[in-house]
Structure formats: C-alpha cells, structure tokens
C-alpha cells in the first residue's frame, strides 16, 4: 500500500525565507529516487537544485515556473512504496534507499540495514528532535504504524540543509565520516567547509592545477549554461516601465540600501604606478607552472595590508556597540554575471599563495558564469576587492558590502604620463580607492592601508617582508 508524502520547500540556509521556481525537473507520474533533484529554484543568493528525500512516484507538483514560494510551502507529493506497471520503480529504488534528511525520511529502511530504532520521534515536543531542528514541519513517516525517522545501528546522516549535502556530494566528501558541531551532532555547513579546507591543505598541489582567470568578471556564456532564472515581469503603463525588485536584483538593492543607511562610509584614493607589478606577473608566468592572474596578486597585496591594518578586517556589532575584528580573511570579489552582481568569497585568503588564489578565483568565477554559486560561497566575507577596471573606468566610490567594514576598488591599468626617477615617462598607472567604515578607524589607518597597497603595487618586492 503506497503512502503519499508531502515534500516541502526546505530552509536553504542563511536565513532565506522564500525561493522562486525556475524549472521543474520532474513531471507528475515520474519515478524519483531518494535525493534526486526535482526542482531548480532561485533564492536571493543563488540558483539551487533541490533534492527530494523520498523515493517513489510523483503525484502532484505545487507552483508553476516563475512562482515564488515561502519556505515550508509544499513542493511535491510522492507516493512511496508504489511501483508503476512498467516496473520503472525498481530502477529508481522507490522503496527508499540512500541517506535520509533529518526531519524527512523514507517509507522503510533499506535491506542492508539490520534494525530500526524509534527512540527519537520526529514530531516530538523536544527541542532536540529532528523536526524541531528543521522547523519545516516535514511529514513524519509511518514505520510499522509509528511515526519516526528511520535510524540504523550507525544512525542516519544528520543533515538538514540540501545545500550542505550538495556541497559534500560535489566535493566527494562522505558525510558519515564527519562529526557535526550542531545540536544532537547535526552536521552544519561550517563542518563540511572545515573538512574541505583540511583536504585542500593536504592536496594543495592538485588545487593549483585548476585553470586561471585574470579578472573576476563573469559575463561570458559557458559551453553548457544552466537555464537562467525568469526575468521579473515588467509592466508598462503610460510610457512607464515597472520591474519588480526581486530575486538577486532585490537582494542587492536591499543590501546596498542598508549599507548606505547604517554605515558612515568615507573614501580615499591614490594613483599608483603598476608597471613593476605587471612586469613581475609577466616574469612569474614565464617561469612555467600555472599562470598567475593579476587579481590574485592584488588579493595577495590586500591580505598583506590587512595583516598590517587589521582594523579594516572587521565588522560593527551595532547592538553591542562593539567592533568585531576577525582573525581570518574571507575575501569577497565583485563579479558581474548575466544574473546580476554577485560577490563570491574566497575562504581563508590570507593563507593562500598566488597560485592557490588564482585557482580559487577561476573556480568561483566559472560558478558565477554558470549560476552554480551556492549561498555558502556568497556569504561570510570579511573584506571585498572590487576590480571595476574591467568596465573600462578609472575610479569609483564603491558602496561597502554590508556588514563588512571596507572595500578596495581597483580601476583600469592604462599607459599614462608619469614622473619616474625624475624624468617624464609613460608608465602603467592605476587608481586605487578605499571605502571604509569610519566607525572602525580614522583616516590615518585607512590612509596607511591604502598607501601600503600602493607601495606594493609600485614595488612588489615590498611583499617579501611578509612572506
């Protein structure tokens, strides 16, 4: 006898409360396997394929493409235990196999599992129960007439977020080998990222083999691009065009407005002779090995400057009236994509060399082009590098990426007349600008940071002091 289970839009992380259906990946009547992606949605941060925790036959879908659904709203219903006449259910594993999302579940334990315990009910009142953790009101599964989440002697994989599962799956990480730091051993995104960073440090050589990208702009079309999200429908009346501020465009608008509303920012700038930096990069790339991008060199200069002026690698806790200084540099970089402006984040940029930074910029830029950046890759930055020179402009007064405290802007590098060693010469000149939160420091600190960056651009050997 088939049991019909309802799968609701889960919490996709980072406090997101809604998502827009971009593309359905299944039809009513299709057989789905456990953890098979069933719908592609766009949040305010990224495009995400949502896997279904049940295996069976899809009996209903809720919402057309372009519809915005709140977290907790029904997505699909699945008849678990029902096999279509064609026998396709055998191939899909409709009875339930593979890992189980906490708070969801399958109709019965797979054959390889030896026994089932029900000590922890899904719908119990305890705050430590799986349903209390998800907050999504997922439908509990009846096992031998009782509601509960199936567990084995080894226990289920305690993961709520599909994004955490996807991050682990894409990087070949076995979640069963992790110990979660959340309540009841719940595996959090931070646990997966920590494990991936540890693996990356162990295999740094493999990481540097990735292709490089000289600039963070992500506007070209990939060979096999993911479908882009439907554009907000514009309404035209009396010659006016009104476009809803929603999705990424709406999220960007809210963040920029909040930054200007809450942060008393100031900007300083300086012109620098980048000729020697360009020569240094040419020499590095002529020496063989993976190519080094200019953006990676600028990032390396940034992290060295932040080590000298850590006040700018911070945030302001307005409620506590405290400046929170970070001990790590998670470096964001602005990238313009077909879906709008995004700011991917390079984790622990301060611990990376130029080759590693080049590879990570390339990976994140490509993910921006194809729309596969996850919320984890778009949040948590402590400082932002904005290379607006790719747009052919010399200068800008960038808006700080709230809740960070500063942003370094880099204009185009162009030949200009310059006094070099007492004589007029044509040199490669760049304008650097720093927008900073005046609450975390005064102009002396900001000016010192920017002057150090300019000195490194003009004389890259200055960086040797920090190596």
Image (cartoon, grey):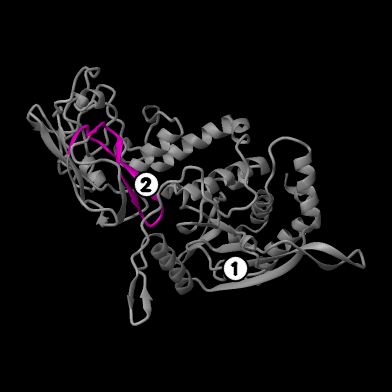
Name the quadrant of the C terminus.
top right
* For residue 284, side relative to residue 199 (left or right): right
- Which of the two discs, 2 and 1, sits closer to the camera? 2
The residue that disc 2 covers is: 48
Residue nearer the viewer, 132 or 279: 279
- Image coords of residue 303 (percent x, y): 64, 52
Magenta region includes residue 33: yes
- Residue at the image point whose x is 37% and y is 75% from the top: 241
Secondary structure beneath label 1: strand
The residue that disc 1 covers is: 435
Q: What segment carries the magenta color?
A: 31-58
2 or 1: tag closer to the N-terminus: 2
Q: Is residue 88 above or below residue 246?
A: above
- Residue at the image point whose x is 12% and y is 37% from the top: 4
Residue 168 visible to an observer of this rendering:
yes
- Image coords of residue 287 (percent x, y): 78, 37
Residue nearer the viewer, 378 or 26: 26
Name the quadrant of the N terminus.
top left
* For residue 35, side relative to residue 143 (left or right): right
Secondary structure beneath label 2: strand
- Image coords of residue 330 (percent x, y): 54, 50
Residue 181 visible to an observer of this rendering:
no
* For residue 30, side relative to residue 181 (left or right): left
Query: How far apart are the two marked residues, 2 and 1, measured between alpha carbons?
Result: 32 Å
- Image coords of residue 251 (percent x, y): 40, 62
């Amino acid at each position: 006898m088939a049991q019909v289970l309802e799968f609701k839009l889960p919490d996709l992380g980072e406090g997101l409360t809604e998502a827009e259906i971009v593309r359905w990946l299944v039809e009513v009547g299709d057989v789905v396997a456990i953890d098979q992606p069933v719908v592609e949605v766009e949040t305010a941060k990224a495009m995400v394929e949502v896997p279904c925790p049940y295996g069976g036959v899809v009996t209903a879908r809720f919402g057309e493409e372009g519809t915005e659904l709140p977290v907790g709203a029904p997505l699909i219903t699945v008849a678990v235990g029902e096999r279509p006449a064609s026998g396709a259910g055998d191939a899909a594993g409709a009875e339930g196999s593979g890992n189980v999302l906490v708070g969801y579940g399958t109709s019965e334990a797979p054959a390889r599992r030896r026994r089932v315990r029900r000590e922890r009910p899904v719908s119990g009142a305890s705050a430590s129960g799986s349903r209390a953790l998800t907050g999504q009101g997922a439908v509990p599964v009846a096992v031998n007439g009782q509601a509960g989440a199936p567990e084995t002697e080894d226990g289920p994989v305690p993961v709520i977020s599909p994004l955490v599962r996807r991050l682990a799956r894409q990087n070949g990480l076995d979640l069963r080998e992790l110990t979660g730091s959340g309540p009841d051993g719940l595996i959090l995104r931070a646990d997966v990222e920590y494990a991936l960073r540890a693996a990356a440090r162990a295999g740094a050589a493999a990481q540097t083999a990735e292709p490089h990208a000289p600039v963070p702009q992500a506007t070209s079309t990939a060979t096999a691009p993911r479908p882009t999200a439907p554009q907000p429908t514009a309404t035209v009346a009396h010659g006016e065009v009104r476009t809803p501020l929603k999705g990424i465009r709406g999220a960007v608008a809210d963040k920029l407005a909040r930054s200007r509303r809450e942060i008393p920012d100031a900007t300083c700038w300086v012109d620098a002779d980048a000729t020697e930096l360009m020569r240094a990069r040419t020499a590095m790339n002529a020496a063989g090995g993976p190519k080094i991008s200019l953006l990676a060199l600028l990032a390396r200069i940034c992290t060295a400057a932040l080590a000298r002026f850590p006040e700018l690698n911070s945030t302001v806790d307005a409620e506590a009236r405290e400046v929170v200084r970070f001990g790590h540099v998670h470096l964001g970089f602005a990238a313009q994509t077909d879906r709008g402006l995004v700011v991917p984040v390079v984790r622990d940029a301060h611990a990376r060399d130029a080759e590693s930074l080049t590879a990570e910029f390339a990976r994140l830029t490509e993910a921006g082009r194809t729309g596969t950046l996850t919320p984890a890759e778009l949040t948590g930055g402590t400082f932002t590098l904005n290379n607006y020179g790719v747009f052919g402009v010399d200068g800008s007064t960038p808006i700080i990426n709230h809740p960070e405290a500063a942003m370094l802007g880099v204009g185009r590098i162009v030949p200009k007349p310059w006094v070099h060693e007492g004589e007029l010469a044509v040199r490669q000149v760049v304008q650097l600008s720093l927008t900073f939160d005046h609450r975390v420091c005064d102009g002396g600190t900001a000016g010192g940071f920017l002057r150090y960056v300019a000195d490194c651009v003009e004389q890259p050997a200055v960086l040797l002091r920090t190596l």
